[in-house]
Structure formats: structure tokens, C-alpha cells
Image (cartoon, rainbow, N blue to C red):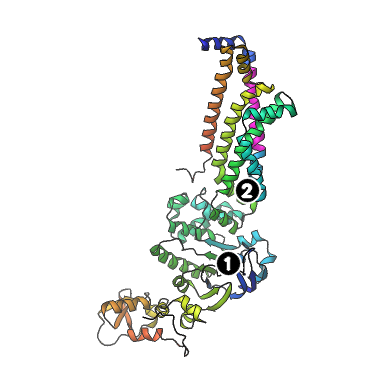
Amino acid sequence: MIDIVDLVKQFPGTARPAVDRLTLSIPDGEVCVLIGPSGCGKTTTMRIINRMIEADAGIVRVGGRDIMQVDTVTLRRSIGYVIQHVGLFPHWTIAENVATVPRLLGWTEARTEARTDELLVMVGMDPSTYRDRFPRELSGGQKQRVGFARALAADPPLMLMDEPFGAIDPITRGRLQDEFLKILRALRKTIVFVTHDIDEAIKMGDRIAILKDGALLQYDTPERVLAEPANSFVSAFVGADRALKRLSPIACATVAVPFAGVAPAQSIDGTASLRDALALMLETGEDVLAVRSGDQWTGVVTLAAIRARTVSHRSHESAPPISAP
Amino acid sequence: MLLIDAWQFIVAHPGRFLNALGTHVALSAAALTLAVAIALPVGIWISGTGRAAMAAITTANIGRTLPSLAVLALVMPVLGTGFAPSLFALTLLAMPPILLNTYTAIQQVEPDVVDAARGMGMTRAEIMRKVELPLAAPIIFAGIRTAAVQVVSGAVLAAYIGGGGLGDFITAGIAMMALPQLLVGAIPATLLSIGTDQLFGWLQRAMIPRGLAS
């Protein structure tokens, strides 16, 4: 779907390239998270894809087409675009904001209106309540819901999302991550997602590309990035608690074994992560938790099973960066 | 007593009065229209440039500090006297506030909003027409309001270079120490300025986009 080959971009007056011979391939329908410290080139790379920034060298192909062969306006209208501060048009209603790209594309009024209502429902904003409101009447989370709907309006196969939850409070952020991910998966969108938050990357990404100084250090699934960091920078970047992080994307239901023996004193929902299960075990002193699906107990998850998931498969583990006690 | 004398002067010379009033309004309206027609596009154009903006803004700032009478006086040796030189001078006076406000208003549109507009595939012209200008409109109109009041008051001075208007009565009144005649010029000119300010203030409020009104 997206092929990036030997991409180079150096801004005038800077000592080194922002993007330095980056090569990356993102399959259809996957969420690729670009992550790294400030100045690593993640946002620059993303913005080159819809030509908000022009590269100095290298090739970017979207759906097999070289982006330089497509005129910028046509290209951008075919790619969803979500930014941290949303950038809703304050003088337009919510419905008009969502209808931005359909109107640019000259859709009929009826089709645009139907699509707008459909999207507002999808992002959890009741159309009859919000259609005619203005952006200043919305909370930060609601604004980003509208921003997301606006980006999806013309059903682009590719979405670029630049720290979409960066300015949102932690509780709302968690809920939006879950909801947006569900929508993106259901619609089979290909996503380039920029963040500096490793937990968000692990949660949202099918693959994580870790960048530093414009170069790609590792491009792997979240599990492999956590289990087998490519070098000491990556292992420091994902954090000393990466063993715990590895538990975050795993749902209890997926490791539950059939229930046998004495009924456990505590239970946990099957959709909760192993990290939550471990926390509950530490808190209650239990080694075994029942796994619930609705009101039904479907199995148990054990401390031993959790430990098995955190032990690295690598034989030559590099020393984790822990300071001396 | 003076007011009654002034009123009687108008009743005695209705043609002269209406003629002067008409010239005053025509001169002001023409100068303002010309200034908008020039300064608005220039303001829009320089909002997208760096160097041209600096030059234009420096010029406009200097222009804004010049006394109205000085501008009229500077024009006279070059263009002579009459309606046209007055129009030229008043247009010059009206341009700086319009130009500066247009530039500032467009600069002040939130960068995130413009970035979103670009990223969604609006052309440069679409961004200007659909996003930047509507959001900049209240501040641009504030500039036009300032210019309008300046032109209407400045037009009084046009009498000094033969431009006509209500200033004729004032200059004549001063020259002949005829106070009623002076008031025939001064009072309507003052009312005209206040009225212009009110009218443009109302227009300015009407230009605030609905989503931004509080």
C-alpha cells in the first residue's frame, strides 16, 4: 500500500537531515506507528506522504502510484488527515466541518448530508444534537471525534494521524483510542500514526517504526519490539518496564485455560489485559483469577501463564538500563 | 443664537449646502472605495509573502503617522487643486489601516486551521476564500471602519486644496470670522463622522462569523 524508499529530507539551515534514507513498507489495512524522540523525523515523514512537505530525494508510492505523479490537491483529498490540535473550521458548523472534503469533491447535497450523519453516528456524536453546533461548543475529545469524522468523510483508504490524542486528557484518550481503533479496523483503513507515547504505540500499532535522527532503528510488531529490541536505544526507549508493557496488548481471554479445581476468589473480564490481571493479582494476593465473559466464567488465568509471556525469547539479552541501587 | 443663525444660513442657501454635503459624501465614499479596492488585495497578497510584507507594512506605518493636512499639502504641488487631488490624498490616508488590518487579520488565523485546510486538499485560493477571509473579516472591517472615519473627517481639510465639501464653510467661516457659517460646516461634518463610525461598527459586528460570536 505505502512504499517509502530511500527518503531524504533536509530543512534549510539545519546540520543534518530530518529524514535520512528511510525505507519502509506498510501493508494494506495496517496501523503503522511512527515513534521516536523529538526531531526523529516522524512527523516530517508523515507529512511527506501527502506532500505537505516535499522530499529532497527518494520515492513514496501510495497504492502503487508515485505521489510526485499526482497533483497535491488531488492527492490530499484522497488521504485522511488528522492533527493534534484538530484544526476544525471555527466558523463552520459540525456538519459543515465533516462535509469539507465531500464538498471539495463536488458531492451532491443529499449524499453529503447522509454521509455526514452516518459519520457523526459512527464517532458517537448524535447528529440531531451536534449537526448544527459550532466547534467552540465542544470539548477537546468531542472536537477530535469531529476531526476524525471529517478525515473519514470521503472514505479515503489511507489516513495520516499526527498525535491525534496528544492534547486530550488521559481518561478520554484511552476511550478515544479504543473507539477509533475499532472503527479503523472495521473499515480496513491503512494508517500512518505518529506519536511519542510508547504505550499508545503498543496499543494502536500493528507495526511500530522506531526512528532516531531521521533513520529507522527497528520496524516490527509491538510484541517483537518489546521482546527483542534491536539495540540499546530501542530498549531504553520502550522503557525498563517493557516486560509489563508486553502484557498490555494481550487479553486475558486469549491465555485463559480451562477451569479446574477450587473456584478462584477473584475474577477479571476476558477483554482486560494481562497487565490488569497481574495488577489485580498483586493487589489481592491471588495466583489464579477466573476469566469472565459477561456473567459466565470461561476459564482461569494464572501467574505462571503471565510470567511465561514476559520471559524474553532471546538468548543474548542486552542489559537493561537500570541505574545502580 | 449661533445655531439659529447657522440654520438660517442653510435655509437661505439650500443649494450651496446640499452641494457641499454631496461633494463631501461623494469624495469620502470614492476615497474609501478606492482604498479598499487597492489595500485589501495588497493586504491579502502580502500575507503570503515575507519580504513584500515587510516593505508594505513599513510604508503603511509611516503613512499612518502623517497628519491628514500634511498629506493634502504634499499632494498640492504635484497634482494641483480640486476634487481629484483631494481624492488622491484621502485615498492615501485611508489605505494604511485597511492594509495593516488585512495583513494582521490573515496572519492571526490559527495555523492549525490553515494546516487542516491544506491537508484536506483545499487549493491556495480555496483556503483564502473559505477559511482565511471569513475568519479575518471582523478585523479587516475594523480597519475599514477606522479608514472610513479618517476619510470623512479628513475630507473637511480638502477645502484647503479646493476639494470642496463641508470644509468650504469652515474655511470661509474662519476667514470671515463668520461663526454661524463655520458651524454650518462643522456640525454636519461632525455628525457625518459619528454616523459613519456607527454604520461601520454595525457592519463590523455583522461580519463576525456565527461560530465565533459569543
Tag 1: Cα neighbours inside 10 Å, few (<14), some, or many (≥20)? some
Q: Residue B196: which quarter of the image?
A: top right
- Would residue A142 appear left or right of B156 to someone viewing this image? left
Question: Residue at the location (59% across, 34% down)?
Answer: B147
Q: In this orientation, which residue lies closer to the viewer: A240 or A174?
A: A240
Image quarter of the N terminus of chain A: bottom right
User: Pointer 1: what residue?
Assistant: A46
Q: Residue B83: which quarter of the image?
A: top right
Secondary structure state at the residue bearing disc 1 = helix
Does A82 appear above or below B2? below
Kind of residue at disc 2: Ser
Secondary structure mostly seen in magenta is helix
The boundaries of the magenta stretch are B18-37
Q: Give how far across and how far down residue A31 sits, in percent.
A: 52, 72
Any magenta on residue A182?
no
Q: Residue B164: which quarter of the image?
A: top right
The answer for which chain carries disc 2 is B
Kind of residue at disc 1: Met
**Cα distance, mark 1 to mark 2?**
27 Å
Tag 2: Cα neighbours inside 10 Å, few (<14), some, or many (≥20)? some
Q: In this orientation, which residue lies closer to the viewer: A208 or A215?
A: A215
Does A159 appear above or below A234? above
- Would residue A1 appear left or right of A197 to someone viewing this image? right
Secondary structure state at the residue bearing disc 2 = loop
